[in-house]
Image (tube, rainbow, N blue to C red):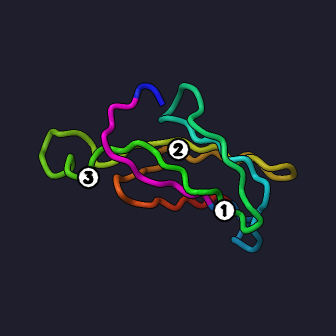
Amino acid sequence: MQGFAYEGSGGLRVSVRTADAALPVAGARVTVWNGEGGEPIATLTTDRSGNTEVLALPAPRASASLSPGSGGAYAVYRLTVESEGYYRQENREVPVFDGVLSLQSAA
């Protein structure tokens, strides 16, 4: 993962479900991107419960948010979610905090 200056790490899990969260979508492809551009960081596939595995991602150390001017408190990622028979979804500015498991839903 080149280009990251972050010293911390957080986790990201994506849950893909049909509209109104009625049913899980198994086999959906979730691509994680660094911010708004560049190459994809990882591609994950949802399990039968509609969840991806936990992906560890670089994030600023939590202590960085304690001092003014020391940078942001979280890293920002972009997700695309695709599955046959469903519309493609894009989630922008998904935050990942150091030491925290972030849960992102997609419908």
Q: Identify the residue position indicated by label 2 in the image.
A: 92
Kind of residue at badge 1:
Asn
Q: Secondary structure at mark 2?
A: strand
Task: Please tell me whether mark 2 or mark 1 is closer to you in this view.
Answer: 1
Disc 2 from disc 3: Cα separation: 22 Å
Q: Quadrant of residue 52?
A: bottom right
Q: Is residue 63 left or right of residue 47?
A: left
Residue drawn at x 36%, y 53% as measured from the top left: 97
Residue drawn at x 52%, y 62% as measured from the top left: 103
**39 or 37, nearer to the observer:** 39
Q: Earlier in the sequence, mark 3 or mark 1?
A: 1
The spot of residue 38 in percent (x, y) is: 54, 25
Furthest-bottom residue in this view: 22
Total labels: the figure holds 3
Check residue 10 for magenta coloring. yes
Q: Is residue 45 above or below residue 2?
A: below
Q: Secondary structure at mark 1?
A: loop
Region of the chain picked out in magenta, as a range: 4-14
Kind of residue at badge 3:
Ala
Check residue 58 for magenta coloring. no
Q: Identify the residue position indicated by label 3 in the image.
A: 62
Main SS, magenta residues: strand
Check residue 51 in the rendering and tell me which mark sits there, or answer none: 1
Kind of residue at badge 2:
Arg
Q: Earlier in the sequence, mark 2 or mark 3?
A: 3
Q: Quadrant of residue 41?
A: top right
**6 or 90, nearer to the observer:** 6
Q: Is residue 106 left or right of residue 57?
A: right
Q: Is residue 10 above or below residue 41?
A: below
Residue drawn at x 52%, y 44% as measured from the top left: 92
